[in-house]
Structure formats: C-alpha cells, structure tokens
Image (cartoon, rainbow, N blue to C red):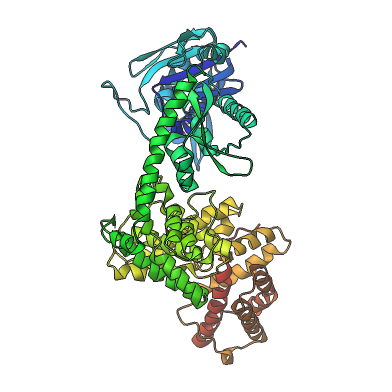
Amino acid sequence: MNKRDILLEIGMEEMPARFIREAIDQLEQKVIGWLDEKKIKHGEARAFSTPRRLAVIIHDAAERQEDSEEEIKGPAKKIALDENGNWSKAAIGFSRSNGMTTDDIYFKEIKGTEYAHVKRFVKGEQTSNLLPELEHIAAGLHFPNNMRWAGHSLKYVRPIRWLVAMFGNEAVPFSIAGVQTDVVTRGHRFLGDKTAIVAPAEYEGRLLDQYVIADVEKRKQLILEQMKKLEEERNWVIPIEEDLLEEVTNLVEYPTVFFGSFEEKFLSLPEEVLITSMKSHQRYFPVRDRSGRLLPYFVSVRNGNSHHIDTVTKGNEKVLRARLADAEFFFEEDKKMEIDDALKKLETIIYHEKIGTLAGKVKRIRKMTKEICLALHLPKDEQGLADRAAAICKFDLVMNMVDEFPELQGIMGEKYALQKGEPADVARAIREHYQPRHARDSVPALTIGAVVGIADKLDTIVSSFAIGLIPTGSQDPYALRRSASGIIHILIDKNWNISLTDLLEKTIAITKEDSIGESKGLLENVLQFFRLRMKFMLQEHDIRHDIIDAVLGGAMDGVPDIMERAQTLEERKDDPDFKETIESLARVLNIAQKAGKEDKIDPALFKSSEEQNLYKEYIRLSDTFRARHGAKSRFSALKQLKPAITNYFDHTMVMADDIAIRNNRLAQMKKLADLIGSFAQMNEIIVK
C-alpha cells in the first residue's frame, strides 16, 4: 500500500509563550488519536511550534483506511422471530437495511437477552477523503484564554492567519474562520517571507530558509549553545532556570543571544530585586562570576539575527535602567517606613470582602501560631519568636517593592525586618512562612517558619471554605490545594504527628470568633479536602488505591503517621501471611458495625477462655498503640492478634441470646475495632 506524509500547520498571531507547550502536545495527540480511530495506519509523528505556529507531521500515512468487519446489533430475538419461528418484518427490514439477507442473521446474548446481529464488511475509505475532518481538530484545540476577532464566532487563543494542510504534495481542503488551507506557510515576521511547501518532508527546511527554527528543542539547544559560548568568552556563569529558558524559547522563532550591562551602583540593591527585575519583567538571565557574585550584566535572546544587535542591546539597557531606577527608589522609600506603621496600614487593606482585612488575618495567624506551638510543646523562647514572626509576617505587603514585584513578598519582609533590627530567625521566618511556594520548592527550615506557615495556610483554607470559596475542577483562585499540600509536606518533613483534625477544629473556632462565613459542616468539608490532597500524595508514592482508602478511612490525625502506615501496608501486601492477617482484622471491623454506642467491657461477663485471651491481647495492643510505636511495630502487633481472633470466633457466638452477654461481646468487638481502625480500615483492603 502506498504511503504519504500528512502536514497540518495552524498559523496565528503571536501566542503567549506559556500556552504553547500544552497546545502543541494537544494537537499532536488529537491528530494521532483521530488517525487511530479512523484505522489509518501511520508512522511516527513530529510536532513543531513557534510563537506563530503549531504544526504536526505524520509520516507514512496509508492511502486509505484498513478494511474492517462491523458487527451490527438489531432487534431482540422475540421481535425478530414470530410465534412460529419465522422471520418477522422487523428482522427482514434490519437485514435489508444493512445490505444483507436473513440468512446472515445470528443471535448474540447481551445482559441475558438475545439480539439479532449481522456482520458487514466495510471497505476502507480513501484517506484523502477523510483528511478534511482535521478542521475539527484544528478548530477544537483548548486554551486557557481565548478571543474572538473580525466578527467570527470561533473562540481561539489568537487570530488564525494561515493554514497549511497537505497529504503528500496535495492540499487538503477546508477552512477555519474564513482562512482557507493552502500549501504556503510564512517565515519570520521581519526576516522571512511566504514560502510554498512542496512536500511535508521539506517543511522544516523551508522554514529555516525563512529564518524560522520550527523545532522547539533545536531552538532551545541553540540558545544554550550560544550562552555557553558567551560564558567561555567572558569567563561568566549564566544561571539557567528551566522555566525561564522554556518561556524565552517560546518567545522567538530565530534566537540570537546577546548581552548588555547596567550601572554597578544598582548592585547595592538586594540580589532578589535585581534578578526579579531582569527575569519577571524583561525575561533576562542574570550573570555571575565564577565565585557566584552577581555582575552588572544581563543576557537576553533576540527574535532575529545579529544584524544591528548593538542597537537592540542599547534599547534593552535603557529599559532595564529605568526598571532598576524605580526599584532603587522603592527600596529607599520602603526603608523609611517603620514596622508598626506598616502594620497599621494592614488594617485598611481588605484581604477579602467576606473575610476582612489583612490585619484581621494576621491576628488569626497569631492565635493559631500559639496553638501549634503548644501542640508541639515548644520552649517559651521559641514560642516568643514564633509569636513575633506571626505578628509581622505580612508587614511587607504594604511596601512599594512588593507592590511592584508581588513575587518578592516575604523575601523583602526578611530584608526590611533585618534592617529594622528584628532577630534573624524572626526575619527568616517571614520569608519561610510562604514556603513551599510551588511543587518544587522546599519547606521552611526553621521551626518557627514552619509553624507560622502552617497557621497562615490553615487560616486561608478554613476562611475560604467558610465563605464558600471551595476549589472546583481547575478553578482554585486562592491556591487552596497548594496551601493544603504545603501543610502536608511541612508536617511530614518535620515529622510532626500533631492531629490535623485538632488543628482544623482550633482554626475553625478562631475563624468563628471573627464571624466569618458558616461553620456548619465546615470541619468535615475541610477534612475531606485534606483527604483528597493526601490521596494524591500517596498515589505519587505508588501506594495501591485500596490501601490509600484504608488508611484515610479513619481519623485525620498525624500526617506523617498516615504516610508511614500506608507505606507499611504497601511493603507487606505481598507477604505470605498478609491475606490471613487482613481477613481476621477485617472480621472484627465488620461485626463491630452491629455494636451500639456502649463500649464498656465487663470481664465478669466473659464465658470462655477465648474471650479472656482476646481481652488480654486487646490490652497488650492498647499499650503498644498508646506508646506511639512506629507503624511497622504496630502492624506487627496487629498481626499477633490473628490466633486470638481466630480462636475467639471458632468458639464464641457474638450475637448470644443473653442481651447482657451479647452487648458485652459487641463492646469488646467495638473497642478492638477502634484500635484496628486507627491503623487502617482493614475491610477496605483487597486481598486475593
């Protein structure tokens, strides 16, 4: 069978760099999925992207679909045959409509009912006749933000300016938003021109002739090579952050690296200010010497060649100079403000209209910080430092520098706090209490930074839930999922087995004092939210789904302990005796569901040695659990229950006729089940 390459290119106005990677992955997957669905055999796919285009080439696509045999379901047997066993009109019509006769009908049972079926040979359609359906794929891409233009109903990330769709050397006809497909693509906006594609295999080379490097990885590699050369020539170190490199790569079609300089006086500004000014606003890379000292230079990437690069450099230097001059002014002005004056300003800043001011939030953080310190039994001096850190943790939010660069919140707080003579640990805690800021960020190193961070995140989550700001789907404007994950990671990192339920109850009580929102059902809603966060984290650690459900089925107490219990069960699930152990423990949990609220055990009502022996094992297990031994030790203690449980059920009728004895036995089951369930809901675990 002959084969041809397929090319689909969507040409647009410049797209936001942050959308491109996801968009091109989406296009490639959708085209491959469509080909597979249509049963069109094909070879490998290659994706291309620049700020102005998304494109995919599918190599060696078949000229037509594969032939297939289609099974078609018809009427039920009782309708297809009359009372004499003859074919009914319904059966005759069914076979005729599919180009068959009643001789081709056979019956097949589906959910207990027999239905008439026929098998029909389907000859594969020509690929060229199907390819216009790519219109729906191209027009149906999803983007975080869309726009309309020129009266078109289509919503898209940016206006579509040209379309290329080819099968071999032939154009595939369709149009989107008034743009008709062609074999002509466009080169670099300033350096290139339109160029015709003779065949898809020539696509990348034709664009390169027009100053477009269509392969994103080749562009990225070229940028890195040019930076490496610059490092060697100037004896520099250019720190490369992958996120910034990815963004810059997706901002250009033909990259040329260049460098500029700024006045050395600006080096007196905090490094974070300089780097943020360069990276966030201008997409520049900072420069350091071999010892790590920041130098008065920056590196950038031009979308074009080196022609008139000196003019480009001067323009960028002028822009950065203005940015740094503003930053210098903000820094000097901020240093004039006292911390107490800044805290008073927080009283006028609304955090949320239904929650209150930032000053109110700080007061709640301070109260919750005290509760966490008490739960951790921290020394008095450390409690004092934590209280001071909580009291001033948001003071820098009123500063000019943070207003200009919001990503510097906490970082500038540390700088200004040190300048005002605050203890070093308090200043550092102001910065650390925001951590982890993202998935790859570290947790606070200082105890007081971690305590204030948990208090702040708890308040954010609880107050948001109280007023109905609950994350749904992809909507999470207050980053509550990130806050919950941050709390979980801090507790695990510090190995703080303080009860999450207790922390949430105290936070809710503090929130209620400020009359924020509705507290009814709030605890369970927030606990469920944390269970989902824990579930995702345990999944990332390759814990089996039923084990996750088992350990999260009980109280949300110590988070590190939940993790350790899940890992213990995951490690032991393949042990030879695991099945029998889980089944015996699950048996207790199941029968305990019949118990009432009464759980007082009276040993005087025991009628057999098996009851007495199980009671002794219960006391032993209680002592082990009360001593807070590790999860492995507690699971070993649970395993030792198996003989006593087996003997008990072999010789004891729990549901005895005597009500007093029955209730006593159910109470014993309930007390034992509570201990077992505090480790995991063993009846949730699947054993074979």
Name the spot of residue 387 as percent of width and height, x first.
43, 70
Name the spot of residue 423 as percent of width and height, x first.
48, 66
In this picture, residue 500 sits left or right of residue 686: left
Q: Which image quadrant is residue 521 in?
A: bottom left
Q: Residue at x 44, y 63 (%)?
A: 527
**Rendered position, 132 above or below 407:** above
> Visible in this render: residue 466?
no
**Rendered position, 160 above or below 574:** above
| Numbered marks: total | 0
Q: Nearer the viewer, residue 405 or 650?
A: 405
**Rendered position, 236 above or below 354:** above
Question: Furthest residue to the right?
Answer: 576
Name the spot of residue 520 as percent of width and height, x first.
32, 66
In this picture, residue 339 sits left or right of residue 682: left
Name the spot of residue 154 as percent of width and height, x first.
32, 25
Q: Nearer the viewer, residue 391 or 185?
A: 391
Q: Which image quadrant is residue 410 in?
A: bottom left
Q: Assign the C terminus to one quadrant of the image.
A: bottom right
Q: Assign the N terminus to one quadrant of the image.
A: top right
Q: Which image quadrant is residue 575 in?
A: bottom right
Q: Residue at x 63, y 60 (%)?
A: 567
